[in-house]
Amino acid sequence: MSLELLNTCASLATSVIVAATTIAALIQLRHLRASNQIEGQLAINALIQSDEFTDAMITLQGMRAMITDPELAESFRGPTSAASPPQVIRMRRAAKLVGSNLENVGNMVRNRLTDRQLFIEQFCNVVSEAWDLLEPFTRVRRKFSEGHDAIWEDFEYLTILSRDWMAKRGSAFPKNMRRLLTEWSDLEIPPARAKRGESEGAAAT
């Protein structure tokens, strides 16, 4: 075997080894990325299903009434301070917990650090509801903010993705698979006793 042929064979062998090493590294990186995404998704699930997040969402149901109250409206236009009314501090703390966390999730989704479809299929309704609850506060903060970046832009981005998916798909359930329950409007459910205030109002009319 000539020296030239040996050199050619050695070069080919080196190329094969380099290619195999590159492929192995890419596979390892892909597995690592998948593992990181799974860990990130589990952390997001734990956050949104936590008692703190749920309590904050319940608190935010009073945001619209509070932020339009002439006695309290001014307290939402600037930073929170010790002089802020306690109920405003509590409301803004809930807003920060929900809004800032969904802002972080939106940033992760936009930068492909977590799986967009997996998150939206699970939590699109939560994101949409949270935006509705926080929209009055978001409007005020954007109007009176002195910064260049609008508050919660990635949260807004995440809401658009969620609502677009809900409008186009509405459900992650496979289309061609049979259902165990009928259409939602046809479901039979046990009767519920009216609350005292509701029953008295109905009787008065």
Image (cartoon, grey):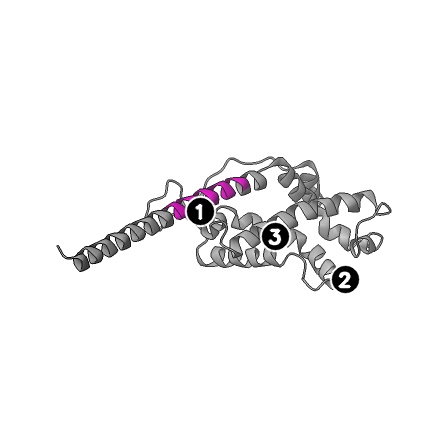
Q: Going 66% across and 37% down the picture, which residue do you hit?
A: 195
Q: Position of residue 158 (x, y in %)?
A: 55, 55
Viewer-nearest residue: 12 or 34: 12
Q: Amino acid at mark 1?
A: Arg
Q: Amino acid at mark 2?
A: Phe
Dots 2, 1 in contact, CB < 8 A: no
Could you classify mark 3 by the number of other residues whose Cα lies within 10 Å: few (under 14), some (14-19), or many (20 or more)? many
Q: Position of residue 154 (x, y in %)?
A: 59, 57
Q: Is residue 100 left or right of residue 168?
A: right
Label 2 secondary element: helix
Q: Quadrant of residue 59?
A: top right
Q: Is residue 55 left or right of residue 18?
A: right
Viewer-nearest residue: 8 or 201: 8
Instruction: Name the front one of labels 3 and 1.
Output: 1
For the stretch drawn in magenta, what is the main secondary structure? helix
Residue position for label 1: 33
Viewer-nearest residue: 77 or 73: 77
Q: Is residue 89 left or right of residue 57?
A: right
Report how far apart the C-alphas of labels 2 and 1 lie in the structure: 40 Å
Residue position for label 3: 103
Viewer-nearest residue: 183 or 201: 183
Q: Please state the extent of the stretch shown in magenta in the rendering.
A: 28-43
Q: Quadrant of residue 156?
A: bottom right
Q: Going 18% across and 60% down the picture, which residue do you hit?
A: 4
What is the number of the mark on residue 144?
2
Q: Position of residue 2 (x, y in %)?
A: 14, 57
Could you classify mark 1 by the number of other residues whose Cα lies within 10 Å: few (under 14), some (14-19), or many (20 or more)? some
